[in-house]
Amino acid sequence: MQLVSGNPWLLLAATYLITAILTALVTNNAAAVLMFPIVMAATESLGINYMPFIITIMMAASASFATPIGYQTNLMVYGPGGYRFSDYIRFGLPLNVLTGATAVALTPFVWPF
């Protein structure tokens, strides 16, 4: 909370970033379950709507392109497709950044703070 200084936009970006990092390390479901109570407490302490943050968690947990670990389908095609771990980082990381920027920019317009 101190890093975002009470700014909902920074909190939204941090939510996406932390969820995306967690999703790259553990499964998407685990990342969402870990982030949900943290975000609920943060939005409650700021007195803002929790819905854009929940949507952002769902987007970040579902848009796991940077590693084969984060989503089942990535792992299923990893071996048979002959992919290397670096292939996921090389192509998936820019896609994660693009998805994150789009989600953080547009989510508050559909679900306001």
Image (tube, helix red, strand yellow):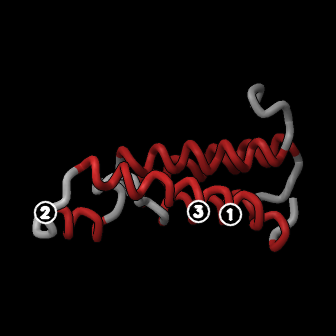
Q: Is residue 92 above or below residue 9?
A: below
Neighbour class for label 2 at 10 Å: few (<14), some, many (≥20)? few
Q: Which mark is residue 82?
A: 2
What residue type is disc 2 on? Gly
Quadrant in the picture for residue 81? bottom left
Is residue 94 left or right of 12 when viewed as pictured? left
Residue under label 3:
99
Q: CA distance from mark 1 to mark 3?
A: 5 Å
Residue under label 1:
102
Q: Is residue 101 above or below residue 73?
A: above
Query: Residue 82 at what x, y percent from top left?
Result: 13, 63
> Viewer-proximal residue, 32 or 5?
5
Q: Residue at x 19, y 59 (%)?
A: 83
Q: Residue at x 66, y 42 (%)?
A: 14
Q: Quadrant of the N terminus?
A: top right
Is residue 91 left or right of 80 when viewed as pictured? right
Q: CA distance from mark 2 to mark 1?
A: 30 Å
Mark 2 or mark 3: whose residue is earlier in sequence: 2
Q: Residue at x 35, y 48 (%)?
A: 26
What residue type is disc 1 on? Thr
Neighbour class for label 3 at 10 Å: few (<14), some, many (≥20)? some
